[in-house]
Image: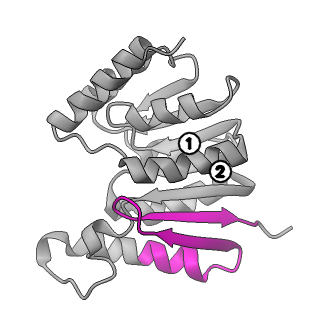
Amino acid sequence: MINIEEFKIMKENALQNHIPIIMDDTLEKIKEILKEKSPERILEIGTAVGYSATCFAMYTGENCIIDTIELDEERAKEAIKNVKKIGVDSKINIMIGNAVDILPILNEQYDIVFIDAAKSKYSIFLEEGLRLIKNGGIILADNILYKGYVMSDYNKHKQRTAVRHLREYIKEVTENPNLETEILEVGDGLAITKVNKKS
């Protein structure tokens, strides 16, 4: 039984403490994809406090498993507490550590991969995501437009690296013939990539 009150508390706490969580309009779009796809296994890169993983657990069938990776140990511990309080812990596996190190040792096959972590690593996450995704699966990348900087001629030093890496990610998912990508201006930008692996 899902504890909606605890879910609301988690969301409010995250917003108050400026912990980045998935935006409502982005979540609506992902909810549509999850309903349509009925995934059995989801991989999330970037757990934070467990908000999006909890949403995915709520929007999928009881047999769906969500594997999620978080670098920040304190946030991961908070996520573990949150998913337990809300009652979705049986569907969510939280792995603590650097996704760059954890992804290469995973061998599951996923229906959906959700990328929402260090922007400078999106290309690495994509490479691993393509290895782990089932044929016909979907890779979602959140914050892909990064406050509009990615599609503008933005070149300030502070965010330059992140912007460059996100542009590289977009180039890869739009030019790879095995991938079909749509970029939506919901939230801070969402890239939806359908994967058609060559037989």
The numbered mark at residue 176 is none
Q: Residue at x 58, y 23 (%)?
A: 91
Q: Is residue 106 left or right of residue 137?
A: left
In front here: 27 or 162? 27
Give the residue at mark 2: 132
Q: Residue at x 30, y 31 (%)?
A: 11
Q: Position of residue 194 (x, y in %)?
A: 67, 64
Q: Quadrant of the C terminus?
A: bottom right
Q: Is residue 123 left or right of residue 6?
A: right
Label 1 SS: strand
Q: Residue at x 17, y 41 (%)?
A: 18
Q: Position of residue 135 (x, y in %)?
A: 77, 57
Amino acid tagged 1: Leu
Which region shows up in magenta?
A: 168-196
- Say whether residue 179 is magenta: yes
Give the residue at mark 1: 43
| Quarter-of-image position of residue 82 | top left
Give above or below for 125 relative to 83.
Answer: below
Q: Which numbered disc flags the more N-terminal residue, 1 or 2?
A: 1
Q: Quadrant of the N terminus?
A: top right
Label 2 SS: helix
In front here: 83 or 5? 5
In front here: 5 or 141? 5
Mark 1–mark 2 distance (CA, rounded to whole Å): 9 Å
Give above or below for 95 relative to 101.
Answer: above
Residue 16 appears anywhere in the view: yes
Amino acid tagged 2: Leu
- Say whether residue 79 is magenta: no
Q: Position of residue 5 (x, y in %)?
A: 35, 16
Residue 110 appears anywhere in the view: no
Marks 2 and 1: in contact by CB < 8 Å?
yes
Q: Position of residue 153 (x, y in %)?
A: 24, 88
